[in-house]
Image (cartoon, helix red, strand yellow):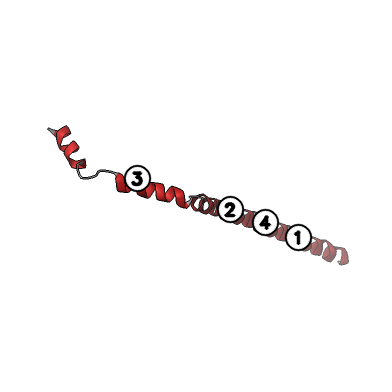
Amino acid sequence: MEENNKSSMGGIVGTIIIIALIVLGGLYFWGKQLKESRSLENLGTEETSEMTTDELNTMESDLQSADLDNLDAELKEEVQ
């Protein structure tokens, strides 16, 4: 009888250890995935913040110097 109890306890302990390893592995991979997604978000933010003031000023001056008054005239000519 005593041997039967020891073998059933061994099975229970083994099962608990296996479940604990599976849970810990899942948490590890979940944390790794969160870290990668955060680094990808930061990468996108860094690329946007790398745009300098000079580039923004250049883009603004290009927009201001663009002649948009006759834009529809070209379209009317193409349609006719």
Q: CA distance from mark 2 to mark 3?
A: 34 Å
Q: CA distance from mark 3 to mark 1?
A: 66 Å
**Crowdedness near tag 1: few (<14), some (14–19) or many (≥20) residues, C-alpha within 10 Å:** few
Q: On the image, numbered disc 2 is attached to which residue?
A: 39
Foreground residue, 49 or 58? Answer: 58
Q: Evaluate if marks 4 and 2 touch, with contact meaning CB atoms under 8 Å apart.
A: no
Q: Amino acid at mark 2?
A: Ser
First in sequence: mark 4 or mark 1? 1
**Crowdedness near tag 4: few (<14), some (14–19) or many (≥20) residues, C-alpha within 10 Å:** few
Which label number is shown at residue 17? 1
First in sequence: mark 2 or mark 1? 1
First in sequence: mark 4 or mark 2? 4
Query: Which residue is found at the position 76% from the left and 63% from the top?
Result: 12
Q: Amino acid at mark 3?
A: Asp
User: Which is more foreground, mark 2 or mark 1?
Assistant: 2
User: Which is more foreground, mark 4 or mark 1?
Assistant: 4
Q: Evaluate if marks 4 and 1 touch, with contact meaning CB atoms under 8 Å apart.
A: no
Q: On the image, numbered disc 3 is attached to which residue?
A: 62
Q: Check disc 2 and report its element: helix, strand or loop.
A: helix
Q: CA distance from mark 4 to mark 2?
A: 17 Å
25 vs 59: above or below? below
First in sequence: mark 2 or mark 3? 2
Query: Which residue is found at the position 19% from the left and 41% from the top?
Result: 70
24 vs 73: above or below? below
Which label number is shown at residue 28? 4
- Left or right of residue 56: residue 75: left
